[in-house]
Image (spheres, rainbow, N blue to C red):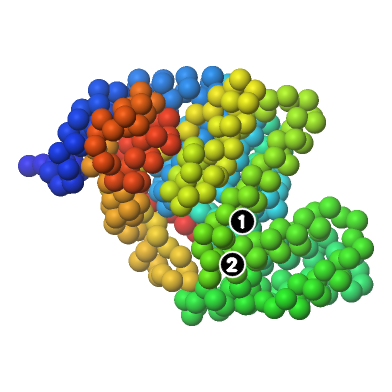
Amino acid sequence: MMTPTALLLVTLLQSAPAPHDTLLVKDLRARAVPMRLANGTLSGAGADSLLAEAKRSQFFLIGEDHGFADVPELGKALMPRLAAAGYQHLALEMGPVSAGLLARSMGRADMDDALSRMFREYPMAIPFASREELEFYGAAKALSPVESIWGLDQEFLFSPAVLLSRLAELAPQGKSAPVARTMADRAAHATREAISRHDPALLFILASADSDWARLDSAFAGTTVPEARDIIRELRASREIYLTSMSRGYQSGLMRSLLMKQHFMDYYRRAQARGKSYPKVVYRFGSNHVIQGASYTGHYDIGNLARELAASTGRTSFNVFVLVLNGTQNKYLPYVGNDADRTGAYDAGSSLEMDVSPFAGAVVDSTSWTYIDLRPLRGRVAAGRYGALERRLEKTLTGFDAVVVIPRARANRTF
């Protein structure tokens, strides 16, 4: 009797949308090598190739679809090897102020307890918080203790409550502290309401008025505390991006990609000022952000910046897409879902809106992961050797250096 995974692979291959995929599958399979992750250790020819590419690169980028345990577990296994290869910085899909909170917690002896408390008190204040991510952060301690975490993104929808509470702690006595505390309390209440009523429009970053932020600006107009200024500036920028997304999705995505690149260059220049001429950085983001060239949504994102920045100094970047085909995924979003979504069935084709059958057909076997170097295929794609490919499949083949195919993954465990 076939295992569920083997049956899935047969089904995907049988449902390949066009005959030209046969040649593509053959070329992918010719470059496919196995890799395994067991007991926290990577092994196999695929793991050796992946680590070799990371060692010779200045930037190593991991793209993913969120909500799996396997991806942070892969990151956890990679961290000590990357640290030994000279990587000192980890760029993550979170805001820079949130990254600062995370980094300070990572520096504590009771890191696990401190972060667990924060994740429970402020649900989803740190994006994608899960028990596996907590272990990944612990492994990231192997990197430099000085500004090891780079938060490149906007501050998350659920971040205002914890960030405004931090702002109240930083405020001098007088008018500043009460204003920040009042806004923090309102943000916490708005979060509870949005979760209980499953309505994201109630979240403070969307429901607050311009006058609220003007009052905050006025209260902190004379502050000399850099972190206080950062909190206000980043929350304001994030609010503008989210509000724009409600009516102009492409423009919002453009604003977000520009903000990420600005944040990256701020961190990068500070690292250079500390004596690292060419800082080595590992990234973990959604795959759309770390692709080279135009992203799936048509933006030139941080993956493209990494590629061009490295090339401008004669160095390289290497980006890999961790592609889960099937399994379970944590799809929990408290403002639209419920506890049942913490472990939901996953199918890559429908979730990613991409033809994944060529990758399914190239897996070495259903019990191990498969590493495939995509770079030799780029010229063949450009020459039309595989015919008219589905748009996202073609973008993946030309926009990533490699893919790690996981036949079946597990949902992560949120707090």
Q: Label 1's element?
A: helix
* Position of residue 354 measured from the top left corner of the image (x, y, whole percent): 31, 49
The one nearer the camera, 27 or 110, is: 27
Above or below: residue 303 compared with residue 228: above
Residue tagged 1: 255
The one nearer the camera, 413 or 322, is: 322
Residue drawn 76% across and 78% down? 211
| Residue type at the position of mark 1 | Met
Q: Are marks 2 and 1 in contact (CB under 8 Å)?
A: yes
Q: Label 2's element?
A: helix
| Residue type at the position of mark 2 | Thr
Can residue 214 be seen by looking at this rendering?
Answer: yes
Above or below: residue 368 compared with residue 92: above
Marking on residue 123 = none
Tally of numbered tags: 2
The one nearer the camera, 293 or 103, is: 293
Can residue 146 be seen by looking at this rendering?
Answer: no
* Position of residue 138 measured from the top left corner of the image (x, y, whole percent): 58, 40
Residue drawn 36% across and 35% down? 397
For label 2, the crowd category at 10 Å Cα-Cα, with few meaning under 14, some 14 to 19 and many 20 or more, is: some
Residue drawn 71% across and 64% down? 236
Residue tagged 2: 244
